[in-house]
Image (spheres, rainbow, N blue to C red):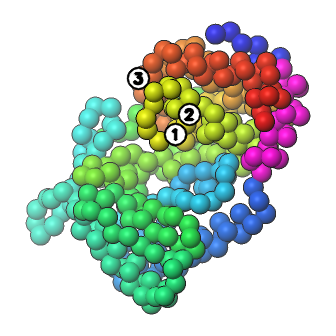
Amino acid sequence: MELRIHAVSEALEEPLQKYYTDFVKMEPGEKVKKVTLQRMLKRLLEFIHSRDDLFADYFIQVGSIADGTKAEAVDELDVLIPLQKDKLRVTAVDQSLNLFSIDEYVDGDWRCLSHDETISRLYELVRDYKDKYYKDDPSFAVKKRTITATALPLKIDWIKIDLVLCIESALRFSNVEWPFPKWLNGQSKWLTYQQQESVRKMGIDMTCHGIHWRPSFSRIDAYLIGEIDSKGGYRKKAFKIFKSLNGYYWTKDQLRKDYQGKSQPFLGSFMTKILYLHAREKYPESQHWNSLGKSFCNFLDVLNQCCNEKRLDHYYQTNNNLFEYVAGETFLWLQENIRNILQNPEEELS
């Protein structure tokens, strides 16, 4: 579908600003809440590490809090808990590199890295911490899931937190060479060569998903979106509006009236970040982002292009189309949503 997206960028300015103020702008106390929560988590991890050095004394913040693109109040979050192992064997389970197995060397032999034992041990240590510092405080709670759990759920200061097991730069224990795409191999239009090299050197982390492990790009996200692209233009503001619209209006239950599951956006959090990064590649210059309307239109333009091509290339992995299994009607539905915004911005952005 051909849409004259940038032609209406000026007309979008006022409706976008109003939408941001009414629905997206973070309350003053949210930043304080985030800092307080991070300090509490830091103390918890330092306590756990002092009792068992299998667990690092730090955590890896993931998601929109880490990269500065959170579009709603802080009410739940995931953090990665690195495991400190020096002898592992990491093997790809499938050719697409979506799943890996991780073995550890124990008593002269290799065995599957026991996530259930590790989660149970983590639970015990968190319980010890609660008993020592928050014994009768209902704002701090921990739940033990079944042995197939991939994360330990906490509640700290009434915020839901999942502690997810993680192996940092896991491919150093493997013969797999990660297939970074061309824009991270010297051909990016917005990243310097040194920044591209930093991404490659950062390595690919793995997070626990049952008996298997999956690649995690959270540290790279935080580096590219949260650090390198932390300032300049209206990118973050426009992206938060984009995410908010996606979360409220571009949902699976609105796409399909017979949808029975939980209401959730069609574009997951990871997909929206990939769109953000491709928008930076397509529009690398600062003048491309010097107004809210223009910045928002950049994201709509990239999404529309992906719908036309039925393709969203993974930003961190070559030959991986994140839209490979999306039905054709979904692309038309997304493009109708884009057209509605362009034609009736005051109605759609309210």
Contact flag, marks 3 and 1 (Cβ < 8 Å) = no
Q: What type is the residue that disc 1 sits on?
A: Ser
Q: CA distance from mark 1 to mark 2?
A: 6 Å
Badge 3, how many Cα within 10 Å: few under 14, some, many 20+? Answer: few
Badge 1, how many Cα within 10 Å: few under 14, some, many 20+? Answer: some
Vertical placement of 196 versus 96: above or below?
below
Task: Please state the horizontal and vertical placement of residue 214, each as a whole percent of the image.
Answer: 35, 46
Contact flag, marks 1 and 2 (Cβ < 8 Å) = yes
Q: Where are the magenta residues, as a range?
A: 8-25
Badge 2, how many Cα within 10 Å: few under 14, some, many 20+? Answer: some
Mark with earlier residue (3, 2): 2
Residue found at x 12% / y 69%: 107
Q: Which residue is under mark 2?
A: 251
- Magenta residue check for 22: yes
Q: Which residue is under mark 1?
A: 263
Q: Nearer the viewer, residue 10 or 52?
A: 10
Task: Please state the horizontal and vertical placement of residue 131, each as a whole percent of the image.
Answer: 42, 88
State the quadrant of the N terminus.
Answer: top right
Q: Which residue is under mark 3?
A: 325
State the image quarter where residue 99 is shown. top left
Q: What type is the residue that disc 2 sits on?
A: Thr
Task: Please state the horizontal and vertical placement of residue 143, each as a whole percent of the image.
Answer: 38, 70
Callout 3: SS: loop
Q: Nearer the viewer, residue 111 or 40?
A: 40
Residue 295 in sight? no
Q: CA distance from mark 3 to mark 2?
A: 17 Å
Report whether 76 appears left or right of 47: right
In the displayed orientation, state which residue is furthest to the top. Answer: 2
Residue found at x 14% / y 59%: 110
